[in-house]
Amino acid sequence: MPDVFVEARDLTKTFNGFCAVDGVSFVIHRGEIFGLLGPNGAGKTTTIRMMATTLPITSGDVRIGGYSVSREPERVRRLIGVCPQELALYPELSALDNLVFFGRMSGLGAAEARSRAMKMLDLVGLSERARHRVAKFSGGMKRRVNLAIALMCTPELLFLDEPTVGVDPQSRNHIFETIQGLRDEGMTCLYTTHYMEEADRLCDRVAIMDGGRIVALDTPEALKSRLGDPTTVTLEDVFLHLTGRRLRDEG
Amino acid sequence: MSRSSRILALAGKELKVFFADFQQLFFSLALPVVMVLIMTAAFGGETRFHATAYVVNLDRGPLGSELVSRLDEQPGIDVELLDEATADERLGRSQLLSVIVIGPDFTEQLEAGRSPNLTIRRRGTGGDEGQITASYAIAVAHQLVSERLTVARARAVLSGMGADIPEGAVRQKVSALYAEERASPTVVAREEAVAARSSPAAVFLPGMVTMFTLFTISLTSITIVEERKKGTLERLVTTRATRGDLLVGFWLGGVGRGTLQVVLLLGLGWLMFRTLFTPGSFALALVFAVLAVIAVSAAGLAVASVARTPDQANWIGILLAMVMSTLGGSFWSLEASSGIVAALGRLTYNFYANDALRRIIVRGEGLGSPVVLQDLGALAVFAVITWAVALALFRVRRDDK
């Protein structure tokens, strides 16, 4: 029986009467890469923000490593690392300064933060550019810095909210390899993306969300089997089958 | 890592970003430098007296030129020689307020032991400079008369003693003794500034300092709103930093930036207008300016909580800065305000900062003055109030409910 590390139960978020996340429940096992897929406005980012303690939960709860997100957010913050969709970093500072700063805010001492920052920059292939200003970096390099920052606190659960948006294939591949390496070391990941082939390649299980609800949850292979031969059916086929072909423009 | 280390790490990051952002750096640090340089150009960077004496020398002998040359040697006085027609024309057009006219028989009268002909032509009172340069000219003329009298008396004494010394030699010796006296005067007036000297710069500098401290509201609030916009603030929430850590860290960052500004402004003010401060009054002015920065930086946190975009934060900050500068007396003397404006002015923090800084810089008052102490207390109260407002309003998330 796999070890349950994350348990979301009836997770709900409403904004001024609009229900963005509607009673979502799922579990994530320790060391698993769990994919959260869905069209724009499906509620993926809202779910991650509630789980990452940055958005108050309207009802329901999430337990991470045994701690309640709504009642013990400080405990939960010690276990998580967040790689947000936005490039949440300081372009005026060097890559090293960015990592050291977030490391110190996560509880590391100055020397420890510096040493870990160099390790993380090495991990994402940026150690040679450590002292360069992030403003001068390409989109792919900035994404890798964004990921490295999330790893500064040695998290047990890593939230990855569309970490490969707008990056070149080389950087994307590097990010994949980094995430797979972290999973092999026992890190649990919650991964959201619009790229179905990414989810197919990386995720052990995926949940497909639409309209704030989970409409399917299983391994990529099992989801594809529901539509036909998994060697010919793609995860995108499954996604479109479950969520429809109607355009989803966020408003 | 302790809470204080996290707070200092955040404040340190704020300063690092500040120094790395050319636009912010220019606005915050280069602008005060430019303002002080403009002030220096306007007021000459000089608080000592300096004036030009306009002289028409009609004298047919050598002593008129001697008077001009000695007047030019006086500290702070420059001489501009004019012909009589030009002088009258410029006086007529109010280009000059006072002209010293050395009469045609100036040397002759002096040599004859009569009062020499020196006329001061002036418009109205002749202005401060005209009156002072005229006094100098009269004093120099007296000096010349005195020298002539000394020569005459010396000759009389020497003749009475039966000494046969040529008049030229007596005159030469007396002139040499007077020249020696002028070079090393027996009475030396030493200047010692016990407090600031009044000058236009002293009047404007306090207002400029408080106006720049008010810009801290914009800078602090824009920084936070931008952090919220790009997601770094939300990311910070997922670290071990508490809301209180973030509040204090951002506030300290704002205090650091504002302190740099006021140190620069006051320091440059002291450098360019040497007699504006004594070390004691400079330190006290700095204390007041930093206290003002402490209060407005907290106001910046409150504005950041209300504003949703950096533009909104900027405009709210500018609006507050302009209204408070106007009401609080940054642009004109506080005594000039009356009625409702004066009453409203007392509700602004910079009223007290301006009052204290003007008392320290212009009047040379210190902590011994009850009014300065009262201003200090009022600033402390404002700092506490702005902190309380910031504490109540500060939001780290865009959609905090």
Image: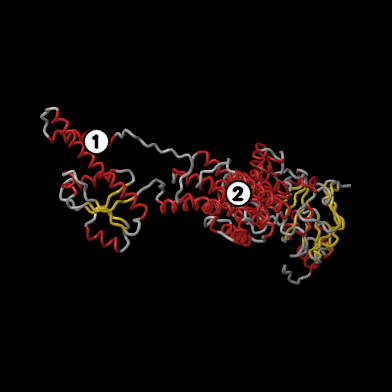
Q: Which mark is residue B178?
A: 1
Q: Position of residue B76 (x, y in %)?
A: 34, 45
Give the mark nearer the N terminus: 1 vs 2.
Answer: 1
- Visible residue check, residue A16: yes
Along the horizontal axis of the image, is B148 left or right of A175? left
Along the horizontal axis of the image, is A221 left or right of B30? right
Residue furthest right as drawn: A1
Q: Based on the displayed image, in which of its 4 quarters is residue B178 positioned?
A: top left
* Secondary structure found at label 2: helix
Observer-nearest residue: B242 or B111? B111
Along the horizontal axis of the image, is B295 left or right of B92? right
Q: Position of residue B124 (x, y in %)?
A: 34, 59
* Secondary structure found at label 1: helix
Which chain letter matches label 1?
B
Which chain letter matches label 2?
B
**What kind of residue is marked 2?**
Ala
Observer-nearest residue: B322 or B114? B114
Q: Position of residue B241 (x, y in %)?
A: 72, 46
Q: Which mark is residue B292?
A: 2
Q: Of tags 1 and 2, which is closer to the observer?
A: 1
